[in-house]
Image (cartoon, rainbow, N blue to C red):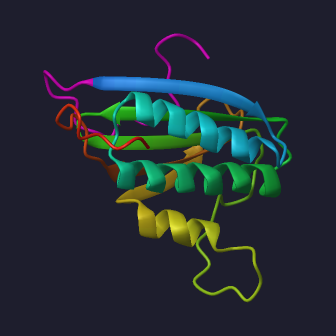
Amino acid sequence: MAPGSALIPRLMDLSPGTETLRYCFALPAHPESVAGARERTRARLDAWKVGHDACDAAVLIVSELVTNAVVHTASTRVVCELSRIGRRLRIAVQDQGHQPGGPRLRRSSDDEHGRGLLLVDAMSSAWGSHDAGDASGRIVWAELPHDAEQLPGTEQPC
């Protein structure tokens, strides 16, 4: 990825003085990588002092988005990007697949598949997807508020 490029569309307010932190990692598109994505996400959000509830929600969202990329696309790798912009946390997962029409919410599902995006929808304040600008796959993103900058000594590790 070129310096300065980001998976996440610039939809959030970047007013002067807003602190922005970004972290990006790539993993092979294998089922075992889902656990690795959760671990990396938890470690980074803990380092950023993101509140416990937002961290748990973000870890679940990353888990579901990476699982979807692994299960529903023919990708060889998955790229995750975490951004903390002010009091908002953004998660983006890029795959190399081309699922026609992108991911879709299924309001009812009788089997154990199809509920991941319902969880993402319930846990996030906004989410969506778009094709990667260079036609290299699809990006699914989610955004949620978080409590950062807690008083010293009151942080609960993520």
Residue 132 can be seen in this image: no
| Residue sitting farthest toward the front | 153
Q: Quadrant of the N terminus?
A: top right
| Residue sitting farthest toward the left | 16
The structure residue drawn at horizontal position 54% and vertical position 38%, both measured from the top left corner, is 41
Q: Position of residue 104 (x, y in %)?
A: 62, 68
- The reply, left or right, for residue 97 in relation to residue 85 is right
The structure residue drawn at horizontal position 65% and vertical position 58%, both measured from the top left corner, is 102
Q: Quadrant of the C terminus?
A: top left
Asked whether residue 48 is drawn in magenta, I would say no
- The reply, left or right, for residue 78 in relation to residue 92 is right
The structure residue drawn at horizontal position 74% and vertical position 32%, both measured from the top left corner, is 27
Q: Position of residue 65 (x, y in %)?
A: 63, 52
Boundaries of the magenta span:
1-19
The structure residue drawn at horizontal position 73% and vertical position 50%, both measured from the top left corner, is 69
Residue 49 can be seen in this image: yes
Q: Is residue 60 above or below residue 157?
A: below
Asked whether residue 12 is drawn in magenta, I would say yes
- The reply, left or right, for residue 89 in relation to residue 81 is left
- The reply, left or right, for residue 59 in relation to residue 87 is right
The residue closer to the viewer here, 58 or 132, is 58
Q: Quadrant of residue 77?
A: top right
Q: Position of residue 86 (x, y in %)?
A: 23, 34
